[in-house]
Image (spheres, helix red, strand yellow):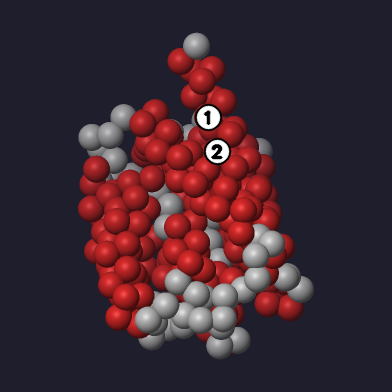
Amino acid sequence: MLLAIVTFLIFALSIIFAMLGLGGAMLYIPVFHWFAYDFKSVAIPTGLLLNGVTALSAAVFYLKAKMVDVKGSIPLTVSSFIGAPVGAWFTKIVPTNSLILLFCIGMVFAGSRMLMTSGAPEKNEMMAPGLRYAIMGTGGFFIGMIAGLLGIGGGFLFVPMMIAMGYPTKRAAATSAFVVIFSSFSGFAGHIAEGHFNWPLMAAATIAVIIGSQVGARVMKDKMKSSWIKKMFGVVMLSVALKLLWKLTITYL
């Protein structure tokens, strides 16, 4: 019964995150944690796996729709792929509550920025290629480390970074889904090497996100406005961060 409830929630969340160009681990992980799955040994590695599957399923649709900047995303893809397993290794020496706090800080930052810029017009000019690739290469490695450490794909930082560099919101979300595939599976491999897995949960949730992400990708392409995507992104991030921070506060009190 518990597995069925968790699987249904993951299915519903995957629809939302596919629309945002995110893997969804920032909500998958808290869901697993709230249902008493261990944060480090189950929630984080399973979240990374589902992050990659959600992103992969959505990215296939976005690639067919020619919404992904494959060539421009190469520096981000390579650097985040390298950084993710480095971050995954650090999970064994960083305390659980510290991981949760870092997770919350990242979501508050990304969510607040999206809400503040949701009404701004789309940028018409891209940053110069040389500078853009340098930022992607350097930023991608550190975002990959954070992603591997916290059990997420990094999309919550990829999307704001690409929008700041001049990408239209929908293109940034679609390209982020493509990049997140590599950092997610790279980070997941680092956790599997440490023996972290729960096969029944992984199997059921994987099927759920494959179906849900296809639904979400189609809705984003045909129905969603850029401003709606930003607002949804911001609200989801802040809501989850506040929930986790509240639980941390109760724990320490």
Q: Name the residue under label 1.
A: 245
Amino acid at pointer 2: Ala
| Residue 136: percent from left, percent from top | 34, 69
Q: Which of 88 and 142 is in front in this view?
A: 142
* Left or right relative to 53: residue 183: left
* Left or right relative to 35: residue 128: left
Q: Is residue 31 above or below residue 57?
A: above
On residue 241, which mark appears? 2
* Left or right relative to 197: residue 120: right
Q: Is residue 187 above or below residue 247?
A: below
The residue shown at (59%, 33%) is: 243
Q: Residue at the right extreme?
A: 223
Amino acid at pointer 1: Leu
Q: In this view, does 69 lie above or below 32?
A: below
| Residue 53: percent from left, percent from top | 49, 64
| Residue 19: percent from left, percent from top | 64, 66
Provide the secondary structure element on which disc 2 rests: helix
Asked if residue 72 can be seen in this view, the reply is yes
On residue 233, which mark appears? none
Asked if residue 197 can be seen in this view, the reply is no
The Cα–Cα distance between marks 1 and 2, rounded to whole angstroms, is 6 Å
Q: Which of 174 and 133 is in front in this view?
A: 133
Q: Nearer the viewer, residue 185 or 164?
A: 164
Q: Check disc 1: other Cα within 10 Å, few if <14, some if 14-19, many if 20+.
A: some
The residue shown at (39%, 60%) is: 184
Asked if disc 1 and disc 2 are in contact, CB closer than 8 Å, the reply is: yes
Q: Residue at the top extreme?
A: 253
State the count of labels: 2
Provide the secondary structure element on which disc 1 rests: helix
The residue shown at (52%, 72%) is: 172
Q: Check disc 2: other Cα within 10 Å, few if <14, some if 14-19, many if 20+.
A: many
Q: Residue 153, located in which quarter of the rendered image?
A: bottom left
